[in-house]
Image: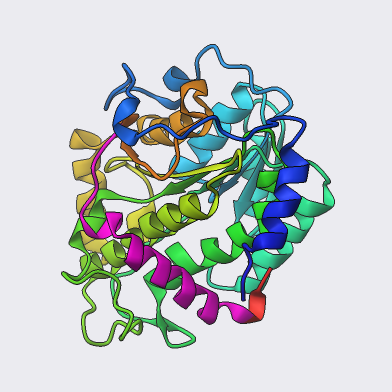
Amino acid sequence: MTPINRRHFVQAGMLTAAGSALGPASLLACSDVSSDFGRRSTAEDVTEGLDLSGKTALVTGCNSGIGYETMRALTLRGAHVLGTARSLEKGQEACDSVEGRATPLVLELTEFETAVRCAEQVRAMGTPLDILICNAGAIFDELWHVNGIEAHFVTNHLGHFVLVNHLLERVLAAPQGRIVVVGSRAHESAPDDGIQFDDLSGESWFATQRAYGHSKLANGLHSLELARRLEGTSATSNAIHPGVVRTNIARNLPAWQEVAFRVGGYLFLKSSAQGAATTCYVATNPDLRHVSGCYFADSNPETPSADMQDAAMAARLWEISEELTRDFAA
């Protein structure tokens, strides 16, 4: 499976010629960009004054938390948002509740065929995809598998891997397409030697935080390798840490842990509006049009762990992900 190959890049060059005849002039180093936004900035703050009319964005996990606030902020600024949820009913309810234009789509990240169908619906619209935000994710309190693979890795990484590969042509068709992968500083809690290529079942290393961190490391490495593969095009890929946010991501944890998360959250954690700020900043800020392969937190670049900067690990992860999803190739 080679969803991003020479043919796609030849097509991409033709599709983006009108909007960016020479592609990016040069990519900026991650340390060359900064903003005045910070931990308390909201999604509305970082998009204030922007006109996103005519742009199309896709946000996974639009029906709650950071995804919902991301969709709300982008539609408020004029973008047409395609919001995915695990059911059409949940997606429709969320899309109906925001100001502006939003269209629901179904995506269950553990069922790769839904990623393929979701992408087919987007392609059928015939419009470039200016923004693709891989936001949806989950935390599970015990080890379980999807086709023998540890569930965090499948849900948080592989499902998005399939979706991105099927939508890449639409991103490349945009004048300056942006892919934003919502990772987490929790990637630092992944197993010491990084991605567990020899035991993706999790049997030898599972613990909730390590498994979640493992999937978040995969998110960051996916974005890093994607940025490398997009070099020479007008499209970019960056990963972000939203902060520790008051959302329902803890819903699958034991009751006492969920209650503790919620009570502590109201005292110390970011709101969803603040949690969506970095996503929206990286997805829309004009100053970042030549920034790719970076990692952001609090709407500013940050240096991730050494593992997340490991280009060889990122390339191997891509190859393994292709093998694991070959039946759903683009």
Where residue 92 appears, as percent x and y from the top left, is: 69, 46
Identify whether 123 is placed above or below 80: below
Instruction: Tell me if residue 86 can be seen.
Output: no
Rendered-image quadrant of the C terminus: bottom right
In the rendered image, which quarter contains the N terminus?
Answer: bottom right
Residue at the spot 21% in from the left edge and 80% down from the top edge = 205
Residue extending farthest to the top is 49
Vertical relation: 32 (above or below) 146: above
Q: Position of residue 139 (x, y in %)?
A: 34, 63
The residue closer to the viewer here, 96 or 277, is 277
Which residue is drawn at the image coordinates 51% and 34% (left, top)?
283
76 or 167, nearer to the observer: 167
* Left or right of residue 125, residue 327 in this image: left
Q: How many marks?
A: 0
Give how far across and how far down residue 267 sits, in percent.
19, 34
The correct choice, above or below, for 27 with respect to 328 in the image is above
Query: Residue at the spot x=28%, y=54% of the render?
Result: 309
Q: Residue furthest left?
A: 192
**Can residue 250 be seen by looking at this rendering?**
yes
Determine the image quadrant of residue 202. bottom left
Q: Is residue 271 above or below residue 196?
A: above
Residue 311 falls within the magenta-colored stretch: yes
Left or right? Give the position of 69 relative to 33.
right
Please state the horizontal and vertical placement of residue 286, each as a whole percent of the image: 52, 22
Of residues 7 and 151, which is closer to you in this image? 7
Is residue 87 on the magenta stretch? Answer: no
Q: Quadrant of residue 217?
A: bottom left
Name the dominant secondary structure of the magenta segment: helix
Residue numbers of the magenta segment:
301-326
Residue located at (47% from left, 22% from top): 287
In the rendered image, which quarter is residue 72 located in? Answer: top right
